[in-house]
């Protein structure tokens, strides 16, 4: 075996090792990853993509998205990067899988530029991230604010009504004056209790 053959085989083994090492690192990432070329055809997908999209990686690589992508939102998202300029490529979207509407996913696209030439585009990295916890937390936060707003407005409305009633203090019978003052006092205590609870939270 001559020297050139030995060098060629060594280079092949080294490239294979580097490729497997890179693929192992990409498979260890908790997010699902997909790499597409300029024609939107997948060139790489890590293992996390399979349970998410319900398809084997081998059935995606080198195949047009409309042949394997069943989700219309994802398909539309991928196809927007077909033959577009690099400046138009970064984007993201949220969707809920049809099989599990309680789950929320964020899909983000990042251009893969050549390290030597930022004008040369290798393709797009598509990252699928489960944001269900963050989404539910935002919804819970919005509901909490809405509930607190309602709880604070109710005593304020009552205070407004009875304070207007007391503006005509001289014309009010004694029992109505006492009732108005008692109601105002009760609503102030209610608001103070709400605010203290909020501060404790």
Image: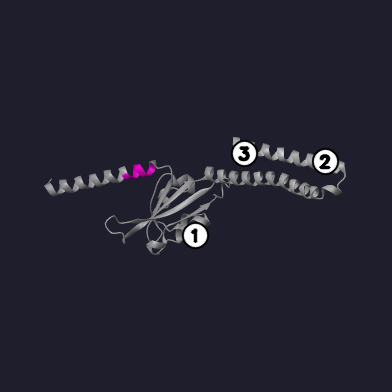
Point out which mark residue 26 bears: none
Q: Which residue does the numbered mark 2 point to in the structure image?
A: 179
Residue beneath disc 3: 198
Discs 1/2, front: 2
The stretch in magenta equals 22-27
Q: Nearer the viewer, residue 12 or 192?
A: 192
Of the numbered discs 1 and 2, the one sitting upstream in the chain is 1
Residue 26 lies within the magenta run: yes
Total residue callouts: 3
Q: Which residue is mark 1?
A: 76
Asked if residue 201 shows in the view, the reply is: no
Q: Quadrant of residue 197?
A: top right
3 and 1 marks in contact (CB < 8 Å)? no
For label 1, the SS is helix
Badge 3 crowding class, 10 Å Cα cut-off, few under 14, some 14 to 19, many 20 or more, is few
Q: Secondary structure at mark 2?
A: helix
Q: Main secondary structure of the magenta part?
A: helix
């Amino acid at each position: 075996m001559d020297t050139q053959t030995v060098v060629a085989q060594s280079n092949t083994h080294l490239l294979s090792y580097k490729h497997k090492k890179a693929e192992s690192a990409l498979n260890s990432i908790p997010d699902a990853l997909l790499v597409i070329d300029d024609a939107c055809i997948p060139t790489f997908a890590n293992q996390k993509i399979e349970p998410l999209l319900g398809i084997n990686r081998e059935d995606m690589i080198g195949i047009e998205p409309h042949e394997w992508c069943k989700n219309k939102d994802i398909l539309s998202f991928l196809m927007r990067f077909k033959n577009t300029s690099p400046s138009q490529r970064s984007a993201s979207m949220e969707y809920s899988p049809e099989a599990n509407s309680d789950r929320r996913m964020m899909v983000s696209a990042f251009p893969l530029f050549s390290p030597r030439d930022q004008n040369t585009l290798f393709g797009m990295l598509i990252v699928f991230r489960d944001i269900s916890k963050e989404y539910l937390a935002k919804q819970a936060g919005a509901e909490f604010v809405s509930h607190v707003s309602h709880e604070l407005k109710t005593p304020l409305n009552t205070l407004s009504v009875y304070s207007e009633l007391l503006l005509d203090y001289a014309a009010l019978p004694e029992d109505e004056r006492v009732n108005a003052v008692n109601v105002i006092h009760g609503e102030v205590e209610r608001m103070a209790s709400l605010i203290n609870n909020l501060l404790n939270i």
